[in-house]
Image: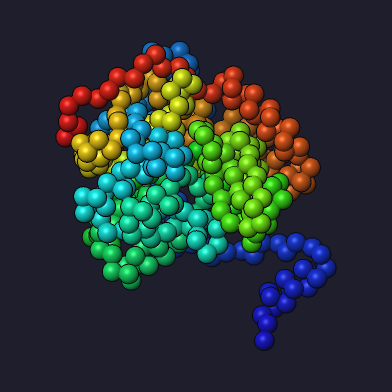
Amino acid sequence: MSRPSEQKRRVVKQAGLRPKPQPGPQGTAEQRAVAQQMPRKKGLGAAPSKRDLKAGLYDRQWLWGPVQGMFLGRTTDPVAREAAASGGVLTATLCGLFERGEVDAVLAVGLDPKEPAQPRYLVLASAQAVLAHAGSVYSYIPATELRRAVREAEMAGHTRLAVVCQPCLVPVVRRWQVRGDYGIQAVLSFFCGWNMTYNATEYLLGKAGIRPEEVRNLGYRRGPWPGGFGVTARDGREVRFGKESYELVNMMFLRPGCARCAYYMGEGADLVCGDAWLRNQPDLTSLLARTERGMELLEGVRSRERVELFHLEEETLLRMHWHNLRYKKYGMSPGMQRLTRWFGRPWVQRMAPFRLLSLASRWRRALKMGVDLERLEPVEGPLV
């Protein structure tokens, strides 16, 4: 016998209407703990001016948190570089953990092999599996999904894990590690500015004219750096949108919780990776080794000549990422708040000229995004 909610959804569907989302559970104790411990943004009034930034007059602890070393990097493995979103250092580091026998599985977000349009946490039990699922995923994945994956790894007998998770879930994994649960050997993260709901993926698939069930494979950073959303249908159709298209869908499908969140550069992880927005030096990764373990991870692949590392000055990192640091650490500007409210309306999402707005975003990025770096200075000597 059907439940009342199921009967209601069936009636609504037959009437040609879209059912309203049903309220979900309040979340696990871990999710609630993360929300309670999440640092509060300081407010735009506390944000340093450009003059203050140039003079170094800002709260380094608030912007960066603990950092052992800042670097630029790229993998020397062409396969990993091709599969990755930028320089491939995170991919190379995970593969290196398998090569050195330090882990027997990695938990990371990827696309479900059985449902190629559905991102979730995967249990990757080999370097080959890491390469097969390399690359960014632009969709929020909740703590409950990470919990499911870690239990799956436990059931499969994996006792030494490395975890790659979004910054807000780093405290969850650290608690497991402190308690001695699941054999966590390393915690890795990434820069996370505008995390979106899965509705953003559905929206882009709709613009591509491909239904989720028709997807053969999908990539959020497909193509030469910086890449973009790309999808291949089972019938061979291929559609791609440049990375600039994310600026529009960011405003449309930004999670309210992510808008409030002050985590950005994987605070609390061992090693954090993000794009290096350098106009004249493409295919590089920005790297923050936050702990001694993070330095060991980098040295482990560098000593085997799997990656190249270069010095990264704090000022350069600031210039590359100040737009997101300002938003994540201090708050969203009033104008951007109005835009996200406006584009968050369903009727605006249906009517917005997607390709025209994406083109405008491309022009804006060409004029304002990225910095020039005169030369790369290789890192000499061992890191640890």
Q: Is residue 42 left or right of residue 5?
A: left
Instruction: Name the residue located 43 percent from the left edge and 23 percent from the top edge.
Output: 281
Residue in the picture at 72% in, 36% down: 355
Residue 184 as seen in the image, left or right of residue 142: left
Residue 297 in which image quadrant: top left
Residue 267 image offset from top left, x and y in percent: 36, 40
Residue most toward the bottom? 1
Looking at the image, can residue 51 be seen? yes
Query: Which x, y percent locates residue 329?
Result: 46, 33
Please, is residue 257 above or below residue 117 in the view? above
The quarter of the displayed image where residue 319 is located: top left
Comparing 111 with 183, the one in front is 111
Using the rendered image of the protein, determine whether residue 257 is visible from the camera's viewpoint. Answer: no
Q: Nearer the viewer, residue 125 or 369?
A: 125
| Quarter assignment of residue 242 | top right
Q: Is residue 115 above or below residue 89?
A: below
Residue 268 picture location, percent across and down: 32, 43
Colour mapping used in the image:
rainbow
**Quadrant where the image shows the N terminus:** bottom right
Q: How many marks?
A: 0
- Measured as percent of width and height from the top left, residue 20 is found at 71, 62
- Residue sitting at 39 percent across and 13 percent down? 374
Looking at the image, residue 351 sits to the left or right of residue 263; the answer is right
Q: Going by the picture, which residue comes out furthest to the right?
A: 15
Q: Quadrant of the C terminus?
A: top left
